[in-house]
Image (cartoon, rainbow, N blue to C red):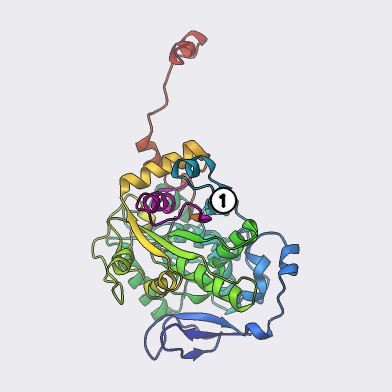
Amino acid sequence: MYRLVCVHCGENYAPDEIIYNCRRCGHLLAVQYDLDNIAVSRKEWDKRPLSVWRYREILPVTIDPVTLFEGGTPLYHLKTIGKELGLSQLYAKHEGMNPSGSFKDRGMTVGVSMALQLKKTHVACASTGNTSASLAVYAAKAGIPAVVLLPAGKVALGKVAQALMHGANVISIRGNFDKALEMVHDLCLSHGLYLLNSVNPYRLEGQKTIGFEAIDQLGGVPDRIVLPVGNAGNISAVHKGLNELIELGFIDRLPMMTGIQAAGSAPVVDAIQNNLPEVVPEKNPETVATAIRIGAPVNAEKALTAIRKTGGTAISVTDAEILRMQRDLARKEGVGVEPASAASVAGVRRLVEEGIIDRNERIVCVVTGHLLKDPETVIKQCEPPTEIDADLASLCSALHL
Ligand code: AN7
């Protein structure tokens, strides 16, 4: 009931072909469903638990999926930060509440299931951290080996810990993420491993369910969805999914897709702000938000379309703005996220200040990963615990009582 279609030239491929780029023009492929002939009903969906698999009719997996109960993440109303910004309808979808602590699990439950469906025996990815953690988790669940390539010294501690503990073969390369992706892509083509970066069209199918869930939780389409952008897979996936809901007649408009990047790593923002036809890669991306330290986003073409077609925008925020919002989310809302995730809400603050966001908008920020992913960046921002002798007098004195 689906096929693979080149996002650029429209060339078709069979769903069981192991292919990541169009043979005719080299661009990426997307999954296209025969939506007229798929029996889906919103009523049926509403009966199922909120999760990636609620939407299984428009996912490519036909076998029993490799699942750890991903999705169904909370949508929090950010009352305090919203009030400060004059936004009464500001929400955060906390993707850090997924099994491995990031939104990547939505992609990996589908991607690793597809690896088994396509009879692949080995999986691989390059990663700024979360993709590797998630792949390690789902490969463990599936019982197949995983190879992950990381940029040496630039991956947050929690993510490396996960990739190692869940048993992936973890390789650190002396180079950045963009180089690691190039290498793992070559490895997969030459040695037959199944590539599970966002060039894999099936993985992104899982990620599109973030948008579906947000609409189901809100009871309607938000005016704007704001996402941190690295490789630009997630913003593209959410947009693709919402277009499918339009085609199915389940919704009648799209939210303004809004992408936020870190100032030292912002090629998509440059392309949007300067109205460029395509993204010019940033050779030396740098930011405290290591998850989105990506200079050559492979899904940029789709992301530019998503932003432009929906009247959205893309802006960058500085590391200081990101860290300030990470602290505000933690202390004013009880929402613990990693720096890249705080970028989406920091971007909203900036867009409000610049007068680009209308205060009546209903806004969903996707906060992509959990606070515990990057404990080192957290500890650096906080005062150390007060150490005292183990007696009540010392305790009272430490508490100024
Ligand atoms: C927390 O793990 O690219 O724009 O290799 O970990 O879809 O790339 C992570 C990306 C946002 C950006 N927030 O999403 C990887 C990786 C967090 C992330 C992004 C990432 P895309």
Q: Which residues are magenta?
A: 337-364
Which residue is labeled 1 in the image? 97
x, y percent for residue 122: 50, 72
Label 1 beta carbon within 8 A of ligand 1: no
Report whether 289 appears left or right of 58.
left
Residue depicted at x 52% and y 10%: 392
In the picture, residue 357 is in which quadrant? Answer: bottom left
Quadrant in which the N terminus appears: bottom right
Residue depicted at x 42% and y 52%: 348
Residue depicted at x 37% and y 29%: 383
In the picture, residue 377 is in which quadrant? Answer: top left
Residue toward you, 30 or 253: 253
Q: Secondary structure at mark 1?
A: helix
Task: In the rendered view, tell whether residue 358 sits above or below residue 256.
Answer: above
x, y percent for residue 243: 55, 75
Q: Is residue 78 visible?
A: yes
